[in-house]
Image (spheres, coloured by chain):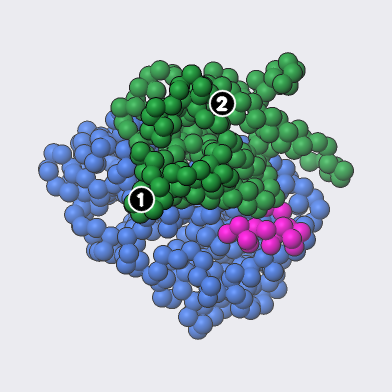
Amino acid sequence: MNHNSEHYSQETFKGLRVAITGGTSGLGLALVRELTGRGARVAFVARKQGGVERVVCQYAGTHGIVGDVSQKEDIHPIAMQVTAMLGGLDVLINNASDLGPAPLALLADTECEDLERALATNVLGPFRLTKTLLGTLASSAREGLGAVVVNISSDAAVNAYPRWGAYGASKAALLHLSRIWNEELSTEGISVLSFDPGDMDTPLHAMAVPDADRSQLGRPETAARLLTEAIGKRISVIRESFHQPCEEVVPC
Amino acid sequence: MLAAHLPIQRPSEAKLLVVDGLGNIRHWVREKFADLLHPGDLVVANDAATLPASLSGEHERSGRPVEVRLVGWGSLRPEAIRHATAVVFGAGDFRTRTEDRPLPPELEAGDRLALGPLGAKVEALLGHPRLAQLAFHGSLHKIWEGLARHGRPIQYSHVKTPLALWHVWTPIAGPPVAFEPPSAGFTLDWRTLALQKQRGAKFATITHAAGVSSTGDARLDALLPLDEPYHIPSNTASAVNQTRKRGGRIVAIGTTVVRALEHAAQLDGSVRAGTGLATQRITSHSRLQVVDTLLSGTHEPGTSHYDLLGAFVDEKTLNRIDRELHALNYLTHEFGDSVFVERMAEANSEAPPTRALVA
């Protein structure tokens, strides 16, 4: 990325209203840090009160929300707190993920409940939260501020890795959901992106592959920076196209 | 009319009574609402999400149970929640009609209410034993968290199943500022929005803190609607003003949109962007300056929503609408059928502009 577009992106993030699920560890925490550092207004969601309070203390000005995206009853309370505290929403990052069985298991050995939990967290949760926040995102789009939904994907969404069945199937569903939603929502001015951060040194990866050589894994901070830049570019493109003069100009 | 008792936002059999500008009445299928739009129309909806405004708890001084229903506040800013107007009921829940609910224990300024994780103090009584100004304790973050966890949407005795937020958030719901759902917006699923666009109509939103439509107490209901804060985004104001210049219709989805747009109307009939506090009542004595057509629920005579229809049509037409709604068994209340009313050319042309009624 050249210096000019990087500079432009920095301006893009000032006051940008961003919600991140799974914001107290791994990629989610790195995104809280990266986006807050660039001047965005950030609300994040995580399941545990203690973790939420710790991150709020660490990153002043962030809004921490205790909630579990896999629980239907939590979705509207989360959405309500996000929109109340941020006064709207421009970017939603569905990052919270569930591995399925830990340690990883062959599909034939996977408990149905583990698959259900992976689907609830990785597919239904992002679907419900996005659907609930769609009115707010569409409003941002109509105002020309740009509206982007990011679903965190994985190479397990496209490759058939043995023992990654629950996770891989749920991420494949999320990937296809993102693609269809992006087609459907483009007329509303909302972009839906998938982002594969690669193998990272995170708590989720440690659960999946406890004996991995951590020195070979990517840093969540690097992935957070790449994703943030991708969001910045997309928002910039949307804002530029919104402010293009129309062919038909009617004075107000 | 019978009350709709199932919490379904868009039943396929929902009916729509259509009144054109000459007072002609016809009956339509509501899910085909977009067919009634013309190229160049602007559809304006209220994107307020509904708060979980019902809080159960205890009046600490007497130790007796209460249900607090938040009904109004001064602005759309998140900190407005600190000081809210509330209607307070005594023991019982929504299964009892509000008309039959007991009064709360006698409230005095300084009384404390324990409402689940929330604590509130009665700041003042507002001229009625049920109506109080409350102040919530704690950080803004904790107040919103407590409301999200403990609050329930205001319930209705005519709907038998308890309502969750997903029953009352419209598909376009955004800022959580309404105390009851802006229920005309239930009509607007994303398919309908796409159909509107295909017909050449545009779409815009305002945010208006819709208050309660009824409290079950005649003295309190006479005060409705309470003052309601609203926000009109600049792109919505521009779209309204451009549409009017081009001769397109402004189609309001719900009475709250009428209230906000008419309140924001300038002397020349253009609408200003920004925030405001709608204080006016719109009745048959009001002359509309902005809104041409209204999609709304079906309303019974004697309610403020019914009175508002009088600004669109003359009394004779209003009576005919009423008879047709009864004859064809239209359902009423939040999840009921709807009316689509074009402003009659001669209706209230001599009346002063609605804005002039602002106190």
Chain letter for the green part: A
CB under 8 Å between discs 2 and 1: no
Q: Determine which of the numbered discs, if any, sits on residue B211 in the image.
A: none
| Residue stretch rendered in magenta on the structure | B188-208
Q: In front: A144, or B47?
A: A144
Give the residue furthest to the top: A3
- Residue at screen point 53% across, 72% down: B12
Residue B198 is situated, as x and y percent measured from the top left of the image, at: 74, 60
- Chain letter for mark 1, please: A
Amino acid type at circle 1 is: Asp
> Where A86 falls versus A171 (above or below)?
above
B203 is within the stretch colored magenta = yes
Q: In front: B160, or A115?
A: A115
Amino acid type at circle 2 is: Ala
> Where B7 falls versus B237 (above or below)?
below
B187 is within the stretch colored magenta = no
Which residue corresponds to mark 1? A109
Which residue corresponds to mark 2? A223
Residue B195 is situated, as x and y percent measured from the top left of the image, at: 69, 62
- Residue at screen point 53% across, 54% down: B171
Secondary structure, mark 1, is helix
Chain letter for the blue part: B
